[in-house]
Amino acid sequence: MSRYTVLKEEPSQDNVENIFETEEKIILCDKCKGLGKIEMNETVDYHKNDKEYWDEECGACGGTGRLVEKTIIKTRKLNKQELKIMGRSLS
Ligand SMILES: [Zn+2]
């Protein structure tokens, strides 16, 4: 099975983009590092530097600690002029 799902493919014209998407994969939430919660704190006494700590549900992942990642890939034809600029020849 292919790693990519073709969303749009029109190979007959110039400058046409082909668009692919990768399969969904589950990744750790970067904001809470997979914990699903964020530690909050508030200073209750500035002189003693006393703080109160509590956890709040991570807003980025909704408390699961995981996100679904899907990458969209676009490809287009490289035209011959661009190839010359890159210093390469087709022949
Ligand atoms: Zn999170």
Image (cartoon, grey):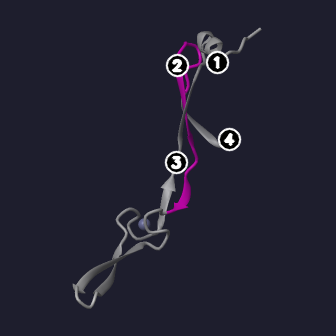
Q: Is residue 81 left or right of residue 59?
A: right
Q: Residue 56 or 89: which is nearer the viewer?
A: 89
Where does residue 69 sit, x and y in percent of width and height? 51, 52
Q: Residues within 10 Å of mark 4 (few under 14, many from 20)?
A: few
The location of residue 48, given as percent across then percent down, is 26, 91
Q: Give the residue type that dot 2 points to.
A: Val
Range of magenta residues:
9-28
CA separation in Å, label 1 and label 4 = 31 Å
Q: Is residue 87 magenta?
A: no
Of discs 4 and 3, which sits in the foreground?
3
Q: Quadrant of residue 73?
A: top right
**Residue at mark 2 to residue at mark 3: CA–CA distance:** 22 Å
Q: Badge 3 is on which residue?
A: 70
Q: Earlier in the sequence, mark 1 or mark 3?
A: 3
Which disc is residue 16 wearing?
2
Name the residue at the right extreme.
91
Residue position for label 1: 86
Occupied quadrant, residue 84: top right
Instruction: Identify which residue, 20 or 1, lies in the foreground.
Output: 20
Q: Is residue 61 above or below residue 9?
A: below
In the rendered structure, which disc, 1 or 2, sits on the residue that comes first in sequence?
A: 2
Quarter of the image with the N terminus in it = top right
Mark with earlier residue (2, 3) = 2
The amino acid beneath tag 4 is Ser
Task: Find ligand 1 in the image and state its quadrant.
Answer: bottom left
54 sits left or right of 12 in the view: left
Distance Cα–Cα, label 1 vs label 3: 31 Å
Ligand 1 within 8 Å, label 2 CB: no
Query: Crowding at label 3, few (<14), some or many (≥20) Cα neighbours within 10 Å?
Result: few
